[in-house]
Image (cartoon, rainbow, N blue to C red):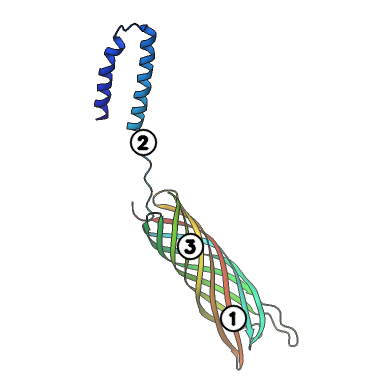
């Protein structure tokens, strides 16, 4: 239809251009330039490239992550505070998987991850006598189960907040006896991050997670009870593959 309209315009202006209306060759050139300019605008509007499609964030995905945990261990010995927050830090990395649903610029999701960890902390040396070694604290794995809500700030960039349930494999080593006491610490997490979609399937992420893993009580000797609580802050990056078009 656009092409037919252009043909009609040209057919209408040719007699006008070739008429000898007294304006001379100069007038014909002015008219010709005006018509060419108008035709160019019309053609540009008709054949302008369509805007690129907005990529979909919906669907299942898997990925791997690597980061660092800044943890703190708090210890009570028979109700007496002996460790206010022993640094328990280290590298953490593993796998994640999830599913997202998109509604306009909002994205909702569920995600789970499992991580191998190498976190280690050393308690304060107890005062003599007797002289004993300080307590040791270890975390060898963590896991998070989270809900997400995000907003697409650019077609290929998503910011999100998350929160849910956390687990950690925590080991308390008593400095006095050298015995290890392991347990699974359950807790909660909250955080947020940013995802950038380099292709419809390949996504890179940077995120922060704060987790409170609760506390456990250990009987390290008859009548001798230690209560250990563990919290951690995680900064990590991830590479994600989204399934689907």
Marker count (numbered): 3
From the top left corner, tell me how far across and down residue 168 is, in percent.
Answer: 51, 74
- Residue at image mark 3: 161
- Residue at image mark 1: 228
From the top left corner, tell me how far across and down residue 74 is, in percent.
Answer: 62, 78
Residue 122 in sight here: no
**Side of 11 relative to 127 (left or right):** left
Q: Are marks 1 and 2 in contact (CB under 8 Å)?
A: no
Question: Could you tell which of marks 3 and 1 lies nearer the N-terminus?
Answer: 3
Helix, strand or loop status at disc 2: loop
Tell me how far mark 3 sits from mark 2, CA to CA: 36 Å
Would you identify the image quadrant in which residue 70 lies? Answer: bottom right
Query: Which quadrant is home to the N terminus?
Result: top left
- Residue at point 41%, 48% (across, down): 199
From the top left corner, tell me how far across and down residue 174 is, in percent.
Answer: 63, 83
- Residue at image mark 2: 49
């Amino acid at each position: 239809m656009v092409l037919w309209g252009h043909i009609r315009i040209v057919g209408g202006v040719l007699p006008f251009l070739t008429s000898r209306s007294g304006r001379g060759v100069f007038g014909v050139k002015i008219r010709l330039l005006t018509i060419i300019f108008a035709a160019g605008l019309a053609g540009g509007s008709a054949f302008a490239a369509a805007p690129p499609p907005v990529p979909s964030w919906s669907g299942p995905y898997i990925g791997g992550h690597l980061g660092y945990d800044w943890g703190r261990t708090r210890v009570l010995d028979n109700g007496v505070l002996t460790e206010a927050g022993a640094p328990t830090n280290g590298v953490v990395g593993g796998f994640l998987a999830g599913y997202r649903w998109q509604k306009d610029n909002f994205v909702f999701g569920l995600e789970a991850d499992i991580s191998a960890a190498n976190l280690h902390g050393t308690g304060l040396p107890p005062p003599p006598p007797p002289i004993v070694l300080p307590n040791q604290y270890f975390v060898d794995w963590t896991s998070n189960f989270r809900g997400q809500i995000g907003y697409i700030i650019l077609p290929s960039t998503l910011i999100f907040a998350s929160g849910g349930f956390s687990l950690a494999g925590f080991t308390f080593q008593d400095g006095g006896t050298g015995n290890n006491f392991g347990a699974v610490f359950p807790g909660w997490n909250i955080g947020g991050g940013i995802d950038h979609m380099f292709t419809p399937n390949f996504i890179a992420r940077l995120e922060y997670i704060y987790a409170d893993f609760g506390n456990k009580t250990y009987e390290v000797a008859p009548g001798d009870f230690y209560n250990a609580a563990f919290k951690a802050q995680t900064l990590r990056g991830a590479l994600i593959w989204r399934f689907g078009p």
